[in-house]
């Protein structure tokens, strides 16, 4: 029996890519698609109906089995009316999201995952592809596919949301391409990929509140989840590895909003003998190539996305922290290492009518000024460089030749007013590092219970060569290139709030 494949996929949409159809062949009747969300209940008769072994068969070993992308590639040169009648292959893949009722009847009104035996190929219309056998049901779909999901049901049923929302599925694919690019780019530059501990007795490398847990092996000790991999990676540099990087999760016990999630993914690399200028040049070159890759991927495989057009052509604009702040507020900043610097900055806040942060320490005051006056200037890709020393305790410092302020050898890349990259020359003096840690403790920027990381200071005594460090948030990078403003959209199963709600109150979309 021959069934034209056009009946199998009557509504191929331009944004459906081959990769979207690679996993399974699914069919849903038009009748099912009209059914609204409901909770499915099972009775004994239904359970027995779907329990039959023929509805979940083991796949038979067959010759010439192709996935959908391979099938498309093999026969892409066939024009309309052309065929290869001697070619008969088995295709397993997701061809369409809806099925006309006539074919649903032909396969006894069943829906699910199918294998299809077919001949020939015409991608645009499917009019020349002929099914030589009735599609085999490989795994039935026992639920009705709704036309859409409400906000109440879409996160707990993310797997269904991926089927209904091609944009959401494309973001996952784009994230994979972005991560792959970063990994390959760093490997090509001579870095080696490593994995560092997620659980430790102390969480260092950033100013953040950690998650704590316990371990059966250490019942009397508190274990912290890492807030950054930085200190571990620099220990590897001390151990003789000149270029290392890690792509992995970190955890911060802080709030959830449109751009923050307690669990997030970063890419960090550390390179011996790299200065700030090299880090900036490397970033600009890498992001320019990445932006071109994203454009190509969106045009071929992720057509449901509309990423913003961003020009990463180097050199990117640069704002020097202290001079830019002074120009914005029309006043000179006080000597930031003086004992009364905090009080003088507070006077400037009052003069400029800027609200004080909840805990007005010197680092938080300066950070608020940056958020108020500098970051709004960074809609296009823009560097903010040479932050005051108190904002960068792990960075090397120097006296700025123009302002005579003590600043860090640090640069942050902002795009669309959001930080994407943070890089700096690493502090490698154990004496200076101790001084900076002690200042952070005075500013209440370090957990007083955790105190100063003595183990890291001892490691520095073995010698850290001049090193450039670089970090980028993968989640924010994917948000930028996918055109979404919600971090939940670039996480496969949403934020921590979504995941916890899913476990507590999971609702069936049907």
Image: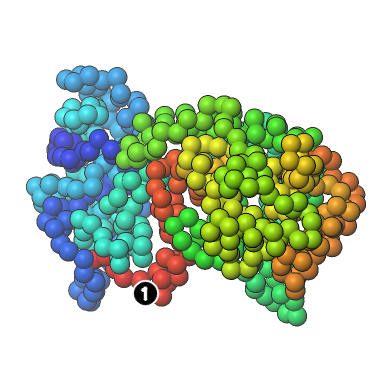
* Callout 1: SS: loop
- Residue 19 in the image, given as x and y percentages of width and height: 36, 39
- Residue 124 in the image, given as x and y percentages of width and height: 22, 29
Task: Answer left or right for 414 relative to 59.
Answer: right
In this rendering, does residue 102 appear at all?
A: yes
Choose between 349 and 118: the one closer to the eye. 349
- Residue 170 in the image, given as x and y percentages of width and height: 37, 43
Q: From the image, tell me which residue sits under label 1.
A: 505
**Residue at 36% from the left image edge and 65% from the top image edge:** 156
- Residue 150 in the image, given as x and y percentages of width and height: 26, 63
**Residue at 34% from the left image edge and 25% from the top image edge:** 74
Residue 70's image quarter?
A: top left
Task: Answer left or right for 473 relative to 24.
Answer: right
Q: Residues within 10 Å of mark 1 (few under 14, many from 20)?
A: few
Task: Answer left or right for 105 relative to 203.
Answer: left
**Residue lying furthest bottom:** 220
Residue 191's image quarter?
A: top right
Residue 241's image quarter?
A: top right
**Residue at 41% from the left image edge and 54% from the top image edge:** 486
Task: Answer left or right for 206 relative to 170.
Answer: right
In this rendering, does residue 175 appear at all?
A: no
**Considering the image in quadrants, where does the C terminus appear?**
bottom left
**Considering the image in quadrants, where does the N terminus appear?**
top left
Choose between 65 and 254: the one closer to the eye. 254
**Residue at 21% from the left image edge and 58% from the top image edge:** 146
């Amino acid at each position: 029996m021959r069934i034209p494949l056009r009946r199998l996929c009557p509504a191929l949409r331009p944004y459906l890519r081959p990769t979207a159809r690679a996993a399974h062949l699914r069919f849903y009747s038009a009748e099912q698609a009209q059914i609204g969300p409901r909770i499915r209940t099972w009775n004994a008769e239904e359970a027995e109906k779907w329990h039959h072994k023929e509805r979940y068969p083991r796949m038979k070993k067959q010759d010439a089995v192709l996935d959908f992308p391979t099938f498309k590639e093999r026969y892409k040169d066939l024009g309309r009316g052309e065929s290869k009648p001697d070619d008969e292959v088995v295709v397993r893949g997701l061809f369409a999201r809806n099925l006309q009722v006539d074919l649903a009847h032909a396969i006894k009104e069943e829906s699910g995952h199918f294998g299809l035996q077919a001949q020939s190929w015409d991608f645009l219309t499917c009019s020349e592809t002929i099914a030589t056998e009735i599609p085999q049901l490989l795994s039935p779909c026992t639920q009705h596919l709704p036309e859409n999901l409400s906000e109440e049901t879409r996160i707990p049923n993310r797997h269904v949301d991926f089927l209904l929302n091609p944009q959401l599925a494309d973001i996952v694919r784009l994230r994979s391409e972005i991560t792959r690019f970063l990994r390959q780019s760093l490997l090509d530059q001579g870095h080696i990929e490593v994995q560092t501990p997620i659980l430790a007795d102390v969480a260092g490398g950033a100013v953040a509140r950690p998650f704590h847990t316990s371990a059966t092996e250490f019942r009397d000790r508190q274990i912290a989840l890492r807030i950054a991999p930085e200190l571990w990676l620099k220990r590897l540099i001390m151990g003789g590895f000149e270029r290392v990087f890690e792509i992995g999760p970190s955890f911060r016990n802080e709030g959830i909003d449109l751009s923050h999630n307690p669990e997030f993914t970063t890419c960090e690399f550390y390179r011996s003998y790299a200065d700030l200028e090299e880090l900036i040049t490397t970033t600009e070159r890498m992001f320019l190539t990445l932006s071109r890759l994203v454009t190509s991927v969106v045009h071929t495989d992720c057509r449901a996305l509309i990423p913003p057009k961003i020009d990463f052509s180097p050199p990117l604009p640069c704002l020097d922290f202290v001079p830019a702040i002074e120009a914005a507020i029309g006043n000179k900043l006080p000597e930031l290492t003086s004992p009364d610097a905090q009080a003088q900055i507070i006077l400037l806040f009052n003069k400029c009518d800027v609200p004080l942060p909840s805990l007005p320490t010197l680092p938080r005051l300066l950070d608020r000024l940056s958020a108020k006056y500098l970051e709004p200037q960074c809609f296009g890709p823009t560097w903010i460089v040479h932050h005051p020393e108190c904002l960068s305790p792990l960075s090397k410092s120097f006296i700025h030749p123009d302002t005579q302020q003590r600043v860090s050898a640090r640069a942050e890349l902002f795009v669309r007013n959001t930080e994407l990259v943070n890089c700096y020359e690493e502090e490698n003096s154990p004496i200076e590092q101790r001084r900076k840690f002690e200042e952070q403790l005075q500013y209440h920027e370090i957990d007083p219970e955790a105190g100063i990381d003595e183990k890291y200071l001892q490691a520095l005594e073995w010698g850290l060569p001049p090193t450039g460090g670089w970090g980028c948030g993968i989640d924010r990078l994917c948000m930028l290139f996918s055109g979404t403003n919600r971090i939940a959209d670039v996480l496969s199963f949403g934020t921590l709030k979504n995941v916890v709600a899913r476990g507590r109150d999971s609702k069936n979309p049907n």
